[in-house]
Amino acid sequence: MICAIIDIGSNTMRMSVYKIEGQQFSVLLSKKETAGLANYITEGEMSEEGIGVMIGVLRRFCASLEYVTVDTIHAFATASLRNITNSEQAIERIHHAVGLEIELISGEEEAIMSFSGAVNAAPFEDGCLFDLGGGSTEIVAFDDRHPYYINSIGIGCLNLYKEHVEKIWPKRREIEEMRNFIEGSLTNLELPHVPKPLLIGVGGTARSLRGLINLRENRDASCKEITRKELEDTIAFLLKKDTAARDAVLKKCPDRIHTIIPGALVIQTLAKKMHAERLYISDYGVREGYLWKKIIKLTT
C-alpha cells in the first residue's frame, strides 16, 4: 500500500509518501514548504491571502504525485487551522479548490500522534516528549511507553517570533520577554514533578537545532542525541547574534533564521523544567504517528 500524508502546520507544510508493508513502512518521497501560515492570521482569522497560500502549496504537493501510484491521500491540520475562527471556511475552500478532505486534529490528538510517531521508532521506556511547532507545543510524559501526562499549549516558534520580535534577530529585551512568557506558560501547565532525564524532541525546529549542535561538535549530521550542556552552549552561541551565529544558521537552516532562537528558548526552558540530562531529537513525529494510529493502527 502506498499512502501520502500531508501535515498543514503553522509554519511548515509537509507531505510524506510511505510504502506500507504489514506494520512496517518506508519513506518514498518527502516534500516541505515554509508557508508561514501564522503570519496570515489577524484577530484570530486567517486572511484570504493565507488560505490562497495554503491552497497553492497543496496543489503543488498533489501535482508532485502525478507520477507516483498512491492508493490514498490523507491531509490533516494542527494549530494552523484549529486556532482560527474561520477554520470551516478554510477547509471548505481547500476542498473546493484541491479536492482534499482536511482532518482537523486537536492538541491532545496531535500530542498522542507525535508520541506514537517518535516512541514507536525508538527503544525508550521512560521520558518526556515535546513537539515544537510554529503555533503550538505538545508535551507528553510517559512511563513504560505509556503516556500519563498529555498537554498542548499555544506557544510555537513562529507565534513567539510574531508576537515578541520586531526584526529578524531578537534584541536582548525581546529575548527576556520571550523567556518570561515561556516560563510563565510552562509553570501554569503543572508539569510532572518527577525529573525526566530523557527529553525527546519532535519537529523541524528541534531537528534544526540538532543540526546546529552537530555542526558545532563536528559530529555526523545523523547523530540524534545531544547533551544538556551542548544545548546550553549552542543557545549561548546563538544569542551572541554575531556573524558566526548567523552564518551557522544560514548554513544549516536558512528557512528558520527568524524562528530558531524563539524555538531554542522553548526547548531550553522545558529541559530545565524537566531536569533533562540528555535530549534525543527524533526524525519521526506527528505524520508517522498519524500513519501508525489511523492507517497501520498500532496502539502505542
Image: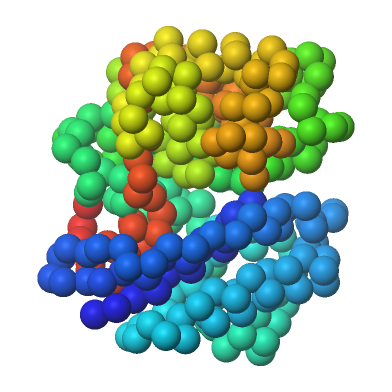
Residue in the picture at 35% in, 24% down: 219
Q: In the visual, does 1 lie left or right of 7? A: left
Question: In the rendered image of this protein, does residue 93 appear above or below residue 159?
Answer: below
Residue in the picture at 43% in, 10% down: 229
The x and y percentages for residue 169 are: 77, 27
The x and y percentages for residue 154 are: 63, 42
The x and y percentages for residue 63 are: 54, 82
Residue 32 position by quadrant: bottom right
Residue in the picture at 40% in, 20% down: 218
Question: In the rendered image of this protein, does residue 285 appear above or below residue 275?
Answer: below
Quadrant the N terminus occupies: bottom left
Q: In the visual, does 126 lie left or right of 213? A: left
Of residue 208 and residue 203, the one placed in the foreground of this image is: 208
Identify the colour scheme used. Answer: rainbow
Question: In the rendered image of this protein, does residue 181 appear above or below residue 281?
Answer: above
Of residue 283 and residue 147, the one placed in the foreground of this image is: 283
**In the current view of this chain or complex, which residue is farthest to the left?**
22
Q: In the visual, does 128 lie left or right of 26? A: right
Q: Is residue 148 visible?
A: no
Of residue 300 and residue 291, the one placed in the foreground of this image is: 291
The x and y percentages for residue 245 are: 64, 21
